[in-house]
Amino acid sequence: NYKELEKILFSMDRKSYSAYKSLKGEYKFEKYILAIDHVQSDPYAPPSKMRIIMDRKICGIPYELTDTKDKNIAVSDFLTRNFYREIQKSGNDSAGTGGSGRIFIDRCGQEILERTSVLIKGDKVEVRFEMGMPARGRRIMGKAAQKIIFEQLPEIVEKSIIYDNLNKKALNEQVILVLDQEYARKILKEKGLVAFVANDSVLPRESGVSDKPMKNAVKFKSPEKFEITLKLPSGKEVSGMGVPKGITLIVGGGYHGKSTLLVALERGVYNHIVQDGRELIISESDAVKIRAEDGRNVEKVNISGFINNLPQNKDTRAFSTENASGSTSQAANVAEALEYGTSLLLIDEDTSATNFMIRDGRMQKLVAKEKEPITPFIDRVKELYDNFGVSTILIVGGSGDYFDVANHVIMMDEYVPKDVTEKAKEIAKLDENKREFSSNDKFKGVTQRIPLKKSFPQFGKLDKTKAKGKYSILYGKELIDISGLEQLVDDSQTNCIAVMIEYFKNKVLDEKLTLSQVADMIYERIEKEGLDSISSYTGHPGNLALPRKQEFCASVNRYRKLKIK
Ligand code: ADP
Ligand code: MG
């Protein structure tokens, strides 16, 4: 129990760092069990992994606050943020060499994600955190360790986890908000919509490096034509812009807020915290941002709907390259998104390949159809909707050609959206340099691909697939660059993708299932057994936050040694 632990810590003072290893185990404190799952080998190594395991009765959070998955996620997120805040307030600070003496917990951003940091399950609440075991040089600071574990930690736990000490109003608010958000996302389809932006939302962010809301921003106001009112489970009625299914064009002068609107829709696949400004910006959960990504690896993707008759007769029904061009990378990104399943594509001209997006009437007259391998997106976007049920919201500020195919045209005018559909359609009618449909055949869809086991050779027994920051993953020595995935929002999602890749190659890859099916199996398991269940660690599972299937599959697709049947 804790008395013993205290004695051991004192007796360890000034001993060599490795003596800390013997602390592994569980210690009973008054209100919880402290589990020391993994002890770092030196003060500079990643901090030691620990858990607080508390009885639900002692914690006191009412069961009706956690009786559905969505509520459980909302409460776990709330407790994680609390714990983080209390660490900052506790005066906990480094005390010696390296990360000595500091307590850490996964840091939440503006989104509310399913995480491993706090687990509320059955009659237990667990907090998963880390601690830099204090040392001076390589000598243990036993008294400092005692102080952190016996003074700082209990106080942090007391203030951040025990229900009676929580800001109950804020906790309730977060739970209600998440339920409203989930409901709004669920009824989009019923209402014939793909996205919703509440009036008074704040779309722009503070800066390129801060995801907090911009102060004094122009608040969102729906054009009358698209304004609808949603009745939410909380009883709140909220009005805003409903973006209908189909093809929606966002136009407007440079710097009038087009990209800001699109980015807000990209992030609308996630739930946001109170006062984020985007709480009620809701998109289809499977919406995918599509961009050009020159240089990416592409492995046997069927891009023939967009690119055909390449020089040297290269087959585009199973197209591979180690260095995709702007247009081929964007075509591959669309094809792959259709493979995993999506109902909404989001495209910004700022990050698109022009030749993938448009080809105007004049260019069509100059360059014969047979000489141009690309069927631009403008000639597929309607088919995608009519025959495959995939809607598109896209920004094209520089070409009016899309007026012909768009169902709705929204103009951003000094950050305020206006409906200009009628006017755009009239202009389209008058046009003399009309373009022609540029393909000889119909869009036939994509091909589901089966990953092969030999894509993932063993690379050393102890090494694991590892995340390096938010935008890269190391598989052995192979770096997977995922910086093109703009809807990835959290380092812990990248961590989770790395763990999922381990799980994927060891447990579920079988050369009969497609990438999409294999991914579904992993998500099914997580749904049933929880996020912990894919981690190979016992105890503290690492800091994981659930990514979407779209980002997981996209990461696998960016792995340069991926082999396809
Ligand atoms: P566009 O894509 O039309 O060129 P952006 O969306 O990039 O324009 O926006 C241009 C600038 O205006 C950005 O710096 C953005 O932060 C700012 N901005 C966007 N929307 C708003 C708003 N509602 N209120 C205040 N500033 C905004
Ligand atoms: Mg822009």
Image: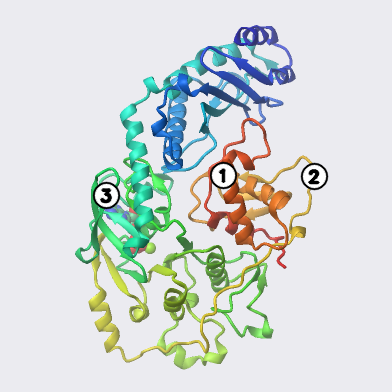
- 133 to 313, vertically: above or below: above
Q: Position of residue 364 (x, y in %)?
A: 46, 89
Q: Position of residue 311 (x, y in %)?
A: 65, 84
Q: Report which residue position mark 1 lands on.
A: 528
Question: Is residue 194 something one can see in this rendering?
Answer: no
- 239 to 254, vertically: above or below: above
Query: Gap between marks 1 and 2, in whole Å?
Result: 31 Å
- 376 to 456, vertically: above or below: below
- Position of the C terminus by quadrant: bottom right
Q: Amino acid at mark 3?
A: Ala
Query: Gap between marks 3 and 1, in whole Å?
Result: 42 Å
Q: Nearer the viewer, residue 328 or 247?
A: 247
- 290 to 548, vertically: above or below: below
Q: Position of residue 9 (x, y in %)?
A: 65, 11
Question: Which of the marked residues, 1 or 2, is nearer the chain's N terminus?
Answer: 2
Q: Which numbered mark, 3 or 1, is in the foreground of this view?
A: 1
Asked if disc 3 is less than 8 Å from ligand 1, the answer is yes
Q: Which numbered mark, 3 or 2, is in the foreground of this view?
A: 2
Q: Amino acid at mark 1?
A: Lys
In the displayed structure, does residue 542 sit left or right of residue 388? Answer: right
Q: Nearer the viewer, residue 170 or 359?
A: 170
Query: Gap between marks 3 and 2, in whole Å?
Result: 52 Å
Q: Report which residue position mark 3 lands on.
A: 217
What is the secondary structure assignment of the residue under circle 1?
A: helix
Q: Which numbered mark, 1 or 2, is in the foreground of this view?
A: 1
Question: Is residue 309 something one can see in this rendering?
Answer: yes
Q: Residue at x 48, y 54 (%)?
A: 487
